[in-house]
Amino acid sequence: MELCALIHVSVAQMILTLSLALMLAPQSQTPQEPTYQWVDTGFDMALFAIENPENAKSKALRINDDLASKEGVIPEPTSGYILTDTIIVETIDLGDLAAIANGTTESWVELMDGAPGFSLVHTASVSTAIDLLPVLDAVYGDDAAYLDAERPWALRALPTDPNFSNQWHLRNTLNPIADVNAEGAWNNGYTGTGVVVGIVDGGVETSHPDLDNNYNSTASQSGGNSSHGTSCAGVSSAEANNGRGGVGVAYDSNWAKLYYGGSSTNVAAFGHRNDINDIKSNSWGPFDNGTISYLTSSERSAFESAIATGRGGLGEVFAWAAGNGGTADRVEYDPYASSRFTLAIGAIGDNDTRSYYNEHGSSMTVVAHSDGNNRGIYTTTSGQGYTSNFGGTSSASPLGAGVVALMLDANPALTWRDVQAVLIESARKNDGNNSNWLVNGVGYDVNINYGFGAIDADAATQLAATWSNLPAEQSSTSGVQTVNTAIPDNNTTGLTRTFTIPDDITIEAVELKMNIDHNYIGDIVVSLVSPGGTNSILTKKRNDSQNDFNNYILTTLRCWGESSAGTWTIKVSDEDSGTTGTWENYTLTVYGHDGGGVGTTLTIAAPTFQSGASTTVAVTNGTASATTWLAVSTTGTGSYSIPALGITLNIANPIPLGGAQQTDGAGATSFLVSVPAGASGRAYWLQALQSGKVSNVLNDTVL
């Protein structure tokens, strides 16, 4: 359903109050005797005992008198039904439908999203909707109008493996927020079926009884075994319900064994059977000692080839352990983990806070649960054994890779870039009181400890299932910019250079290639500020006695979703005495896409909504004198395409707030949102849109 259809009818002006009133208002908790009524739900015509018929939603019991056995035994009432105040009608004539509905009760109508030919009638309560049904039946027919209701659903049982209870990273019963939230994804049917996770390591025990049935020999290389690789494979893909050990997060996925080593060995692993391997998990990298390392040209070429041709052109997905060097190291010093071609996955523990060894980094994508607070990770190990002490970002990477397998189970059409986007969009803001959280130029929460937050398997798979792929990748580069200036020694002011990019690209990643002549590069601090004002620290003062930056690529994701257009500021300083050097040149390259997906220059800002008060939502940086809408969701992020406007919203089930506004000559306007009393504690997501543009997403909870 396009947005224009939503606002076509006369309800456009009342939506400002009704949409929030209907969905944000808390439900009455007043106990009362159930009301018994026959209700047509579309999937059943039955007698229900309705708990709270005057509410917008009510629990209900199905009375099963009509299901008596041949012996006359009547089943007990069935619980788990939820009746709503909404009627589904098979018509697209909103004018006639509104006239009929409003003839008996106050209501508003809209076209039904995702089902052409159907509309929705929203009434004041469950009982009002039930009373209206006979009126609509008389006009549209018995089968053309029925109550929108939820029947009880059978959830998949949790794995029965004897030590599943030890796998707190999958289901944390002591601190339920501090796990990867796999259960929701499993319940929705996503277990990794048909997806292959390559474990790039020192080998995997292929005969391990908790791994052998999921082993894909065709996708594998030949070689020996290692306990480390065996543990990684168990985290992603250990079998379920086989009476042994625990499970992998993607317990129905296949896994393959691949090998790291010298450049040629690595290149062979990166390129091996990318027609079968969908994801490659890498829990290895350079020493985590605070010194920079280089990616060879052949390895970078192998990455480029894998993302260009892997998975039939959708791109191989590389998950990478972000590193265990703590605050003495940074992800940027590891050219594998920090590459824009990989997902740098850091670690948090069972308290949902930073693992003590987790590194900082502007190129960190997300974090996943591992050891480092209290408990370790239970998984497979050498021979037929198990360990409860696996950890490090070595464990976080295959956990993240396994979640990607669940995402590809939900939507096999995701490209490698879309996988990154879905992980970022669905990430959960963990450790919310951490002082390193900041909001980038278009509203994304980002943290040097956590990237964009903790991986949430349930949220990631739900978003993946409805995701519309990003537009084709675009890039803009400064080319080589000569500096050839001495860097002041032991001086935090350093040197600053700016470059203006005219191209308006929605940013996904930014690479800064640096050439600096210096005899002790540990003295060098490099930072980058985007046109949107987001600062990325790329190196810090450290013990690194190497000479020079030679075409060294520093990568940041912190500007995700911002516009590339405008002035970029690069700062280089030498913050210790004794050695001096020269900043020779730099090349700044921005990678992203042209609108339609996450973020554009269109920006919204607003204070937190307050129950019973009006709040102004400011829209800026839009197209001048253009029609602009504000949409709200109360269900979360998602992917909602509006082809008529050439855009995709990043919120689920959007509803317009008020009528359209026209921006002024500077591309700005505002919306006055009235929040009904009693809405405190309800979450909401806001996004503005114009033809060809969407804004950042504002997510908050009504005060």
Image (spheres, helix red, strand yellow):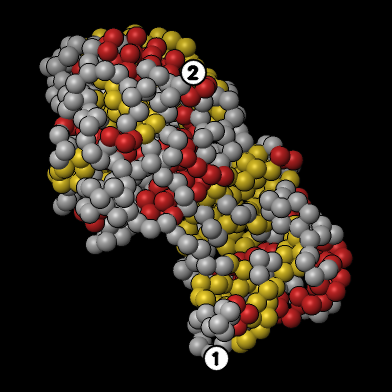
Q: Could you tell me residue 471's position as x and y percent? A: 59, 29
Q: Residue furthest bottom?
A: 33
Q: Is residue 335 visible?
A: no
Q: Which residue is mark 1?
A: 33
* Closer-to-camera residue (447/83): 83
- Residue 376 in picture, x, y percent from top left: 17, 47
Circle 1: residue type: Glu
Q: Is residue 457 above or below residue 54?
A: above
Q: Dot 2: within a 10 Å radius of its alpha carbon, few (fewer than 14), some, or many (20 or more) residues?
A: some
Residue at (72% x, 48% y) in the render: 2
Specify whether 512 is left or right of 520. right
Q: Name the residue rendered at 84%, 67% in the picture.
A: 140
Sequence-first disc among 1 and 2: 1
Label 1: few (<14), some (14–19) or many (≥20) C-alpha neighbours in 10 Å: few
Does the image show residue 341?
A: yes
Q: CA distance from mark 1 to mark 2?
A: 63 Å
- Mark 2 lies on residue: 309
* Spot occupied by residue 240 in the image (x, y as percentages of width and height): 32, 47
Secondary element under disc 2, as helix, strand or loop, is helix
In the rendering, at what x and y percent does residue 91 appear? 81, 60
Residue occupying the point 52% across, 21% down: 313
In the rendered structure, which amino acid carries the disc numbered 2?
A: Thr
